[in-house]
Image: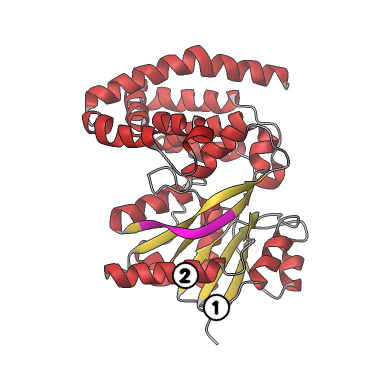
Amino acid sequence: MKPQLSVVIPCLNEADSLPRLLRQLAAQKALSLEVVVADGGSTDNTQAIARTHGVRIVSSARGRAVQMNAGAKASRGDWLLFLHADSGIDNPCLLCEALQTLQAETTKSGNQRVAGHFALRFMRSGTRQPMAWRYVEEKTRFNRPYCTNGDQGLLLSRHYFEEIGGFDEALPLLEDQRIASRIRASGAMITLPGILHSSARRFEQAGFHRQYLLMALIMAMHAAGLESFFRRAPDLYRAQHETSRLRLMPFFGLARECARQQGRGFVWMAIGRLGRENWWQLFYFLDIAMRPWLGPARYPCLGFYETRVEPFTRNRGCDALAAGVLWLHFYLIVLPWCAWQDYQHN
């Protein structure tokens, strides 16, 4: 019988995480499911574990975009769900309800160009920094640019996936952001019901604030069109199983070298535009900080920004202002802090 849904899982040495996810997928109810493990050259027991669970294995070159495209091509379902191997599902009806929601949305709107993602809850080893984790978790509920990442899953029809050309394999990073941008440009992105769990291991091993700063730098380089940064970044950006305490100064050194080649003024204006487009996060942060008093899912500060502030920020003057503020913040605060952190962990 042809499966209703094909779940594609890109893997590289995921023997520790994969068994849990495969067990949880096997426990999903009320739909016909196919699981495809797209392996990028694992040297541990990843493939043996996949065979033990009776799922399909596809081998490809290393790289999430390449692996997920290969897995999608080998799958048979009319609907595709891309999940990271360190995801967790505690609701046996999560995928059935998600698929029904997406199908209902396409029927209601008459638009087949709809994709969905889940809100996240991180699986952590401790309880430190609760506000920081609340900040990143609640942001996954939104459908704003730069808020949809691969660890939130991606559910869409095979037809739409093929129409937008699958995942972009041109760069070794940001395949999730790039496909989300194409979806928003050609169709719609919705938040699916339920919660998907995701491992916090990269944040915990690299350091929460270091990892978040690296993510911001990667998005800044992408906004500035510095593809040379991404071609050279794989030597610095480690796979999940290789993650350790993160040193940021090599990344900043590479970014500075790439910016010098492109023109620093142009790069800072592009980063300023990105900063201006994300000013809303300052107001959102205030809502998160006041969450104990506001109660769940209330965002008055963000609402104030959207109605009273945002309409006046859409101009090049605000881009230049944001660029200047970010430049001062970077050189006076971020760079000295990162240098000190790297020095402490040499």
Residue 148 shows up from this direction: yes
Label of residue 270 in the image: none
Secondary structure beneath label 1: loop
Mark-to-mark CA distance, 2 and 1: 9 Å
Provide residue 289's location: percent of width, then percent of height.
51, 30
The relative height of residue 328 versus residue 45 in the rendered view (above or below) is above
Secondary structure beneath label 2: helix
Residue 165 shows up from this direction: no
The relative height of residue 332 versus residue 67 in the rendered view (above or below) is above
| Magenta stretch in the rendered image | 189-196
Residue 326: quadrant of the picture: top left
- Check the picture and name the quadrant holding the C terminus: top right
Residue 27: quadrant of the picture: bottom right
The relative height of residue 288 versus residue 32 in the rendered view (above or below) is above
Q: Which residue corresponds to the image point at 51% horizontal and 74% vertical from the top-left?
A: 5
- 42 lies left or right of 193: right
- Give, as a three-letter code, the residue at label 1: Leu
Q: Which residue carries the number 1 mark?
A: 31
Crowding near pointer 2: few (<14 within 10 Å), some, many (20+)? Answer: many
Q: Which residue carries the number 2 mark?
A: 99
Q: Is 237 one of the magenta-colored residues?
A: no
70 or 79: which is nearer to us?
A: 79
Dot placed on the residue nearer the N-terminal end, 2 or 1 = 1
Identify the main secondary structure in magenta. Answer: strand
Marks 2 and 1 close (CB-CB < 8 Å): yes
Q: Which residue corresponds to the image point at 54% horizontal and 34% vertical from the top-left?
A: 292
